[in-house]
Image (cartoon, rainbow, N blue to C red):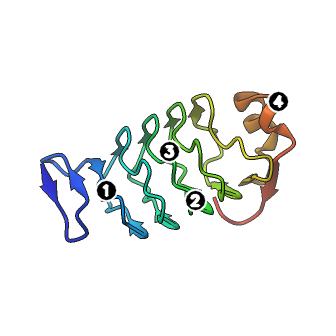
Amino acid sequence: METDQYGVEFDSAREVLVEAPADIERYTVPDGVTLIDEYAFAWCKSLSDIVIPDSVTQIASKAFIGCESLERVVLPGSVTWIGEKAFHRCPSLVAVTCRGEKPPRLGMFNFVSPDIIIHVPKGCARAYAQAWGALYSGRISEEEGFV
């Protein structure tokens, strides 16, 4: 295991972000990380801002569960899978921006707040609604210029 200056732990190759300290408030995931592991940011109640680089392809189950202060998340187009409950119990989460034209596979119980808006590239709302199901279809908004 390796630890960075913020106390965030990684596997020895620094491709898997394993765990963040509970008191972390904002963080930029280093380029080269491909997986945000299960429970990596779980119950980081003060986490309000997370930057996820294009190298990340997977966000594991419960990776951000209980991040009560997290308001917005931008998911790069490289993300192909979001595990079950990855963003569960994030009551402040009101906006998710998905930069990929192809929706990532989505596990159950993600983005369930009734106030959440999911921003997707122009022309992609139907693909996201079909892939993610009826629960999300009324919350998807197409945006231009961010693919």
* 23 to the left or right of 136: left
Q: Nearer the viewer, mark 1 or mark 4?
A: 1
Hey, which quadrant is residue 38 in on the image? top left
Q: Position of residue 34 (x, y in %)?
A: 34, 46
Mark 2 or mark 1: whose residue is earlier in sequence: 1
Foreground residue among 54 and 19? 19
Residue 65, which numbered label?
3
Q: Which amino acid type is marked by label 1?
A: Ala
Q: Which amino acid type is marked by label 4?
A: Ala
- Residue at 62% x, 62% y: name it: 72
Q: Real-space Cα distance between discs 3 and 2? A: 16 Å
Q: Real-space Cα distance between discs 1 and 3? A: 13 Å
Rendered position, 81 above or below 98: above
Q: Real-space Cα distance between discs 1 and 4? A: 33 Å
Residue 134, which numbered label?
4
Question: Mark 3–mark 2 contact, CB under 8 Å?
Answer: no
| Residue matched to label 2 | 74
Mark 1 or mark 4: whose residue is earlier in sequence: 1
Mark 4 or mark 2: whose residue is earlier in sequence: 2
Q: Which amino acid type is marked by label 2?
A: Val
- Residue at 51% x, 40% y: name it: 86
Foreground residue among 87 and 106? 87
Residue 20, which numbered label?
1
Q: Nearer the viewer, mark 2 or mark 1?
A: 1
